[in-house]
C-alpha cells in the first residue's frame, strides 16, 4: 500500500493512525502542532480530506468528524479519510475565531489559503496545511458553525466544469436544504475555493453554532449525512439517501448590526423573510423598546444573532438570496 504521511501521522496499511502536523511555533519556541487522523480502508481509493475548527470556536465540526470516524471500520472503507479536527489550534485553546498570536489584520484562516511560507502566522499556518491538502486530497470537506444551534446550510465551490459538478454531487448527498453554489469570485482565500481552483472539489458545512451552541442531534445527523457523502463517492457500501430538493442561492447577504442593546431574535434559520420584515427587537437597559431589526434583503435565513446582547458591528443576519428550488 502506498505510504500516506502527514506530519508525524504515517499510514502504510488499513486501519487508523494519528499524529501531529507542525503549523508554526509558539512564543516559547515549542512547535505549534495540530492533530491528524488517517483512516485507511482495506481497498485503495479516493482520499476524502475533512477538517474542522478553521475558526477556533466552531467545535461542532470537530465532534461531527470524530463521530463519523468512530463509526467506520477500515474493512468497510474504500480509500482514505484524512481528518484534521482542529486546524486553528491556538484559536481553539482560547475558544475564539482567530489565533491570539496573530498580530496583523486578516487573521481569518479561511481567507488566507493557500498561505505563504514567510507571511504572517495565519498565512504560514495556511501554507503548512494547504501543502499537505493539495498533495493528498481528492475531495475537501470543511466544517464550520455559525451562531445558533439551528444552523444547517452548506456551500460548494461552483467553479466551471467537472470540479463544480462533483462539488454539487457532494452537496446533494449531504442534503442540507439551504445550499449555496459559491460563485468563483466569492470567499477568496477559503480552503474550499482554493482547493477547487486546484482541481479538488470543495464543500463547506455550516452545522450548529459556535462554542456550546450545538446539540447531540446535530452531530449525529451531520455524521449520517457525511456517511451518505462517502456512499455517494463509492467509499462506503449501501444505498445513497435522497434528501430531496434543495434551495440553491445566487449568493448571500451578510449584514452587521448598526445598534446595540438587549436583543431578541424573532426568526429562525431556514425561515423565509422579505426585505423589511421584522427579525428581532432591541431594548435599552432601562427596559424601553429600542426598535426592531429588519431583514435587509429577501431570502432564507442562514444565520441570525442569538442575542441576548448586541454591540454595533456584530453579525446580525446572514441571508441566502434568490432561493431556487432544484
Ligand atoms: Zn467558520
Image: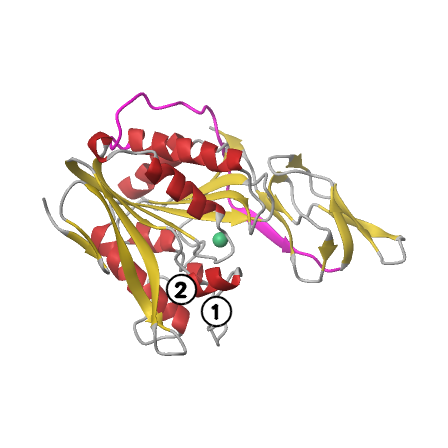
Q: Image quarter for residue 77?
A: top left
Q: Which residues are magenta?
A: 233-259
In terms of secondary structure, what is the magenta stretch mainly?
loop
Q: Are marks 1 and 2 in contact (CB under 8 Å)?
A: yes
* Mark 2 C-beta to ligand 1 under 8 Å: no
Residue 199 is inside the magenta segment: no
Color encoding of the figure:
secondary structure
Question: At x 72% / y 57%, what residue is drawn?
Answer: 310
Locate residue 139, reporting x and y percent: 29, 44
- Whether residue 63 is visible here, answered yes or no, is yes
Instruction: List the single residue furthest toward the bottom.
Output: 28
Which residue is more in the foreground, 152 or 236? Answer: 236
What residue is disc 1 on?
106
Whole-number angstrom distance, CA of label 1 to CA of label 2 = 8 Å
**Label of residue 67 in the image:** none
- The number of callouts visible is 2
The residue that mark 2 highlights is 112
Horizontally, residue 64 falls left or right of residue 311, namely left
Q: Is residue 227 above or below residue 283?
A: above
Residue 209 x %, y %:
56, 46
Residue 179 spot, x, y in % from top left:
48, 38
Give the answer, above or below, for where 157 lies relative to 92.
above
Amino acid at each position: 500500500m502506498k505510504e500516506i504521511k502527514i506530519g508525524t501521522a504515517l499510514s502504510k496499511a488499513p486501519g487508523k493512525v494519528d499524529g501531529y502536523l507542525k503549523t508554526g511555533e509558539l512564543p516559547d519556541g515549542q512547535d505549534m502542532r495540530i492533530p491528524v487522523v488517517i483512516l485507511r480502508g482495506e481497498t485503495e481509493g479516493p482520499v476524502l480530506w475533512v477538517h474542522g475548527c478553521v475558526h477556533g470556536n466552531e467545535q461542532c465540526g470537530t465532534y461531527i468528524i470524530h463521530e463519523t470516524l468512530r463509526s467506520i471500520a477500515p474493512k468497510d472503507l474504500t480509500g482514505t479519510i484524512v481528518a484534521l479536527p482542529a486546524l486553528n489550534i491556538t484559536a481553539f485553546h482560547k475558544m475564539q475565531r482567530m489565533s491570539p498570536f496573530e498580530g496583523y489584520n486578516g487573521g481569518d484562516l479561511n481567507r488566507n489559503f493557500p498561505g505563504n511560507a514567510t507571511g504572517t502566522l495565519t498565512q504560514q499556518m495556511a501554507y503548512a496545511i494547504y501543502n499537505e491538502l493539495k498533495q493528498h486530497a481528492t475531495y475537501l470537506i470543511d466544517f464550520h458553525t455559525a451562531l445558533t444551534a439551528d444552523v444547517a446550510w452548506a456551500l460548494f465551490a461552483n467553479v466551471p466544469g467537472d470540479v463544480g459538478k462533483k462539488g454539487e454531487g457532494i452537496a446533494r448527498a449531504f442534503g442540507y436544504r439551504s445550499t449555496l453554489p459559491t460563485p468563483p469570485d466569492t470567499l477568496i482565500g477559503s480552503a474550499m475555493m482554493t482547493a477547487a481552483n486546484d482541481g479538488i472539489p470543495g464543500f463547506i458545512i455550516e452545522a450548529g453554532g459556535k462554542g456550546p451552541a450545538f446539540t447531540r442531534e446535530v452531530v449525529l445527523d451531520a455524521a449520517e449525512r457525511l456517511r451518505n457523502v462517502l456512499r455517494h463517492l463509492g467509499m462506503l457500501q449501501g444505498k445513497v439517501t435522497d434528501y430531496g430538493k434543495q434551495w440553491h442561492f445566487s449568493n448571500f447577504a451578510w449584514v452587521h448590526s448598526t445598534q446595540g442593546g438587549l436583543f431578541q431574535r424573532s426568526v429562525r434559520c431556514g425561515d423565509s423573510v422579505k426585505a423589511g420584515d421584522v427579525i428581532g427587537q432591541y431594548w435599552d437597559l432601562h427596559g424601553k423598546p429600542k426598535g426592531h431589526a429588519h431583514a435587509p434583503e429577501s431570502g432564507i435565513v442562514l444565520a441570525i444573532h442569538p442575542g441576548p446582547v448586541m454591540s454595533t458591528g456584530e453579525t446580525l443576519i446572514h441571508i441566502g438570496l434568490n432561493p431556487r428550488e432544484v
